[in-house]
Amino acid sequence: MRFFQKFTLLALIFFLFACSDKQTEKAGDDSHPSFSELPEITDESAQAFEQAVVPIAILPEDKEKADKAPEGMVFIKGGCFIMGNDYTQADEKPEHEVCLNDFYMDKYEVSQARWEKVMGFNPSKFSGANLPVEQVNYDNVQKFIEKSGGNCRLPTEAEWEYAARGGAETRYFWGNMVNEEYTWYEENSQKSTHPIGSKAPNQFGLYDMMGNVWEWVDDWYEPYYKMRTKDNPTGPATGESKVIRGGSFDSSAGALRITNRIWLHPKNKVFPKVTTYGQIMNEVFNYIGFRCAKSIP
């Protein structure tokens, strides 16, 4: 009889654990559908996490604005979206609604040829006219902007994320799995930058929004988002470091996420690299470039 009682008790405990696991799985179904940490995906199941990158059509009422886009820029139709990510690192929180006006943005990262034409020198480690300029700090970029005659400013962080997202709600604008058709990163770059526009564009027709080189934006960095205004936010008024977005050719797949943020002092050309376990390695080349934006009156 005692054996039977023990067997019955063990069977009951097993049943309760099984039910608990099912309830946990059911609760997991209600987690954020776009940014929850996904398990390793096999080639057979990866297709379920991909989405078609469909160009965003220009509406008839926006055609005149789109046609007036400066050379090398594309029209970005404004709108509202959810910025940030509650399910990854702390400085991407909290998710919050942002609404933006229409604007223009460079189709490509600024090339070395374009930089040298304006500035008269080339600071890049990897030399090539059609490669993105890199090793430029925020202050260098401001000098480029001053010499560009009103045709360039840095995008705000909100504008950058909105443009990079292209209306997608997944980790990357193409889906939840890395797709080398769209990005240069540590697994396919051969440890170098590559010519701008040599990968496929996003829904807005923007190239290299993920990978190749990091990109400066205009916002000062703060360790979490403070919702000062929903409309056209520009970040804090002051700070010590500026925000950098998009990942680079030496970034991991995780760093390419649309919402990922890093920061750097505006005068720095190099930064200390933090390893997986938190140690600080020697300073490394920053591989940071930029692309221009422009407001529409």
Image (cartoon, grey):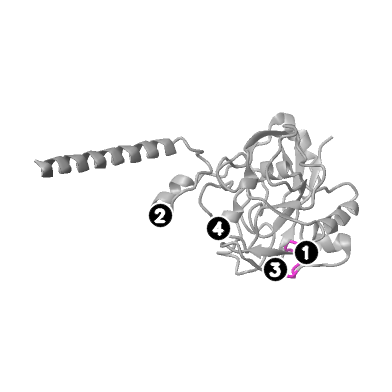
- Residue 180 badge: 4
Residue, far front: 2
Residue type at tag 1: Lys
The answer to if 146 sits in the magenta stretch is no
Residue density around tag 4, few if under 14, some if 14–19, many if 20 or more, within 10 Å? few
Looking at the picture, which amino acid does disc 2 mark?
Answer: Thr
Identify the mark nearer the N-term, 2 or 3.
Answer: 2
Q: Quadrant of the C terminus?
A: top right
Q: Residue at x 72, y 45 (%)?
A: 157
What kind of residue is marked 3?
Val
Query: x, y percentage for residue 221?
Result: 74, 48
Question: Which label lies toward us, 2 or 3?
Answer: 3
Measured as percent of width and height from the top left, residue 252 is found at 58, 60
Q: Nearer the viewer, mark 4 or mark 3?
A: 3
Q: Residue furthest left?
A: 1
Q: Earlier in the sequence, mark 1 or mark 3?
A: 1
Q: Which residue is mark 2?
A: 42
The outermost residue toward the top is 61
- The range drawn in magenta is 125-135
Dot placed on the residue nearer the N-terminal end, 4 or 1: 4
The CA distance from mark 4 to mark 3 is 25 Å
Q: Can residue 182 be spotted in the picture? A: no
Residue on which disc 1 sits: 269
**CB contact under 8 Å: marks 4 and 3:** no
Q: Nearer the viewer, mark 4 or mark 1?
A: 1
